Image (cartoon, rainbow, N blue to C red):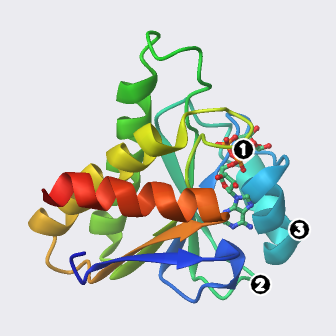
Amino acid sequence: MPERIEIVTGDITRLAVDAIVNAASSSLLGGGGVDGAIHRAAGPELLAECRTLNGCPTGEARLTKGYRLPARHVIHTVGPVWHGGKQGEPELLRSCYRNCFAIARQQGFSSVAFPAISTGVYRYPLLEACRIAVEEARAALAENPKLKKVYFVAFSDEAQRAYQDAFQEVRS
Ligand code: AR6
């Protein structure tokens, strides 16, 4: 595994990084899963800032502060709902990662942590999602020397295995 990419297990809201990524809904007004956890940990100021953003289309990303989180910022991105894979889902998921990395580059962030976007409520198959995540992280790291660390947060054993398998494939 390249040393600038690390798979970690547990709760993304505990990570003290420049930005954690939120798998949000297009309203940006909160929800369940990792979105709910991030809003609970960040406090009501996060929702107040999100209200000013007027939502976010699928595949795009928006930046807020991190408020009570140990992370300094939150990059909110809206992954695609999985409908079988022939309705542009891979391109939209790739676009989420690219737009998050573009914000990280614009802001000069050195550390960013991602949940497995779209793989919960939105039902995107884990291994396919992890492949896209790993490919885009490698591309972003190759062109952004200021970015020192990308964390992929696995919230289950299955997710951890999927990230590891995706790494093996990309490296071989
Ligand atoms: N830390 C890290 N990963 C987590 C955490 C956590 N605290 N909690 C869940 N995960 P999901 P989606 C993992 O459903 O599929 C929301 O309601 C989880 O195991 O949070 O993109 C939004 O408002 C899974 O692997 O996001 C949207 O409406 C991954 O995070 C919708 O769900 C993503 O699962 C977005 O669905």
State the mark number for residue 44. Answer: 3
Quarter of the picture containing the N terminus is bottom left
Q: Is residue 46 left or right of residue 60?
A: right
Identify the residue position indicated by label 2 in the image.
Answer: 68
Q: Residue 115 in the image: x percent, y percent? A: 57, 60
In this view of the protein, can residue 102 be seen by the observer?
no
Q: Upstream in the sequence, badge 1 or badge 3?
A: 1
Please state which of residues 40 and 11 is positioned toward the viewer in this rendering. 11
Residue at coordinates 79% horizontally, 53% vertically from top-left? 33
Residue at coordinates 49% horizontally, 46% vertically from top-left? 61
Separation of disc 1 and disc 3 at Cα?
Answer: 13 Å
Q: Determine whether the residue tagged by mark 3 lies in a helix, strand or loop.
A: helix
Please state which of residues 28 and 11 is positioned toward the viewer in this rendering. 11
| Labels 3 and 2 touching (C-beta < 8 A) | no
Q: Is residue 114 above or below residue 10?
A: above
- Of the residues shown, which amino acid type is indicated by label 1? Leu
Q: Quadrant of residue 94?
A: top left
Q: Determine whether the residue tagged by mark 1 lies in a helix, strand or loop.
A: loop
State the mark number for residue 28. Answer: 1
Separation of disc 1 and disc 2 at Cα?
Answer: 18 Å
Q: Upstream in the sequence, badge 3 or badge 2?
A: 3
- Of the residues shown, which amino acid type is indicated by label 2? Arg
In this view of the protein, can residue 162 be seen by the observer?
yes
